[in-house]
């Protein structure tokens, strides 16, 4: 872990009318980390991601990525700087083929001439070769989630934010997905922040976890610390997470 955070969120507040969805939240993600962001439904996790990635403009606070103050930047500009994300409700273009969807991501950094090499590389990496010419609308959830990841990877991110990418996967699919993420982290040096309710995944791959509850960050620590943290147990986890800690 290096000393300078790759992502530093300071005192971020995002409101919807009178509802304070994210309240004065501060967190950091360091290069090489896989950080989990957890909390009950409606805690503000997706809103925080949206504020970080430029979809929402926060009322207050600052987002710094690789030393650049990106608060208020548009999403495509943030993506160009090296931060990409997936969506909780998959946004794969349902009428497009798998390879065209990945190609859209690859145009982030490449022109027509060398986009294909990237598409081929990512399709192989994500094991989408068998379905590359299929239309996304015909795919099942697990495949769609992989396409979504592939599209984000094709933008060649240094940091990837995943919003419930493990949701709805069966045990085999989940285990393969976790292996893929760990390999992307280790071999491709991609730093991750993952919003996830699937405790097997959070406790299995995250080095550090931060917990949001009602818009506020209530805890930060290792999987073991978080799964034994009384406040987190009361707000969200119960005792279920302890079983998954490595
Ligand atoms: N576009 C919006 N307009 C108004 N309220 C919103 C909007 N998006 C989210 N909210 C509200 O903000 C709060 C935080 O929602 P958010 O979707 O960020 O939670 P979450 O932690 O991602 O929950 P989940 O685990 O269910 O995905 C909730 O009370 C939600 O109803
Ligand atoms: Mg959400």
Image (cartoon, rainbow, N blue to C red):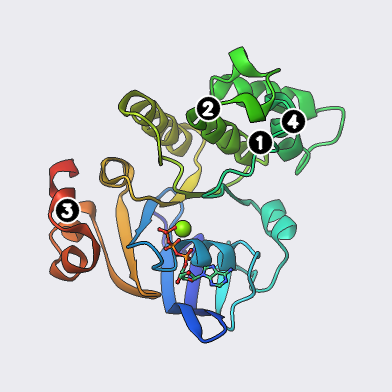
Q: Quadrant of residue 236?
A: bottom left
Q: Quadrant of residue 217?
A: bottom left
Q: Residue at x 72, y 26 (%)?
A: 97
Q: Earlier in the sequence, mark 2 or mark 3?
A: 2
Q: Which residue is mark 3?
A: 224
Q: Earlier in the sequence, mark 3 or mark 1?
A: 1
Relative to 197, 12 lies left or right: right
Instruction: Say which element carries label 1.
Output: helix
Q: Which residue is mark 1?
A: 154
Q: Which mark is residue 96?
A: 4
Q: Which mark is residue 140?
A: 2
Q: Are marks 4 and 3 in contact (CB under 8 Å)?
A: no
Q: Residue at x 78, y 29 (%)?
A: 115
Judge the density around disc 3: few (<14), some (14-19), many (≥20) Cα neighbours within 10 Å.
some
Q: CA distance from mark 3 to mark 1?
A: 33 Å
Q: Are marks 4 and 1 in contact (CB under 8 Å)?
A: no
Q: Earlier in the sequence, mark 4 or mark 1?
A: 4
Q: Residue at x 41, y 69 (%)?
A: 27
Instruction: Say which element carries label 4.
Output: loop
């Amino acid at each position: 872990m290096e000393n300078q955070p790759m992502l530093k969120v300071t005192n971020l507040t995002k409101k919807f009318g009178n509802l304070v969805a994210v309240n004065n939240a501060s967190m950091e993600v360091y290069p090489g980390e896989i950080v989990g962001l957890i909390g009950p439904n409606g805690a503000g996790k997706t809103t925080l991601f949206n504020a970080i990635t430029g979809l929402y403009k926060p009322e207050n606070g600052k987002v710094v990525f690789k030393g650049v103050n990106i608060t208020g930047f548009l999403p495509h500009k943030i993506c160009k700087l090296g931060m990409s994300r997936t969506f909780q409700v998959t946004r794969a273009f349902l009428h497009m083929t798998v390879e065209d969807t990945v190609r859209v991501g690859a145009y982030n950094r490449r022109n027509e001439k060398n986009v294909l090499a990237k598409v081929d590389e990512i399709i192989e990496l994500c094991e989408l070769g068998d379905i590359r010419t299929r239309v996304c609308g015909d795919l099942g959830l697990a495949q769609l989630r992989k396409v979504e990841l592939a599209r984000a990877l094709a933008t060649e991110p240094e940091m990837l934010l995943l919003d419930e990418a493990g949701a709805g996967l069966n045990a085999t699919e989940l285990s393969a997905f976790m292996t893929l993420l760990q390999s992307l982290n280790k071999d491709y040096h991609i730093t991750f922040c993952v919003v996830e309710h699937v405790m097997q995944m959070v406790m299995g791959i995250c080095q550090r976890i931060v917990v949001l509850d009602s818009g506020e960050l209530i805890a930060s620590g290792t999987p073991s610390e978080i799964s034994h943290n009384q406040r987190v147990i009361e707000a969200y986890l119960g005792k279920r997470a302890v079983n998954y800690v490595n």
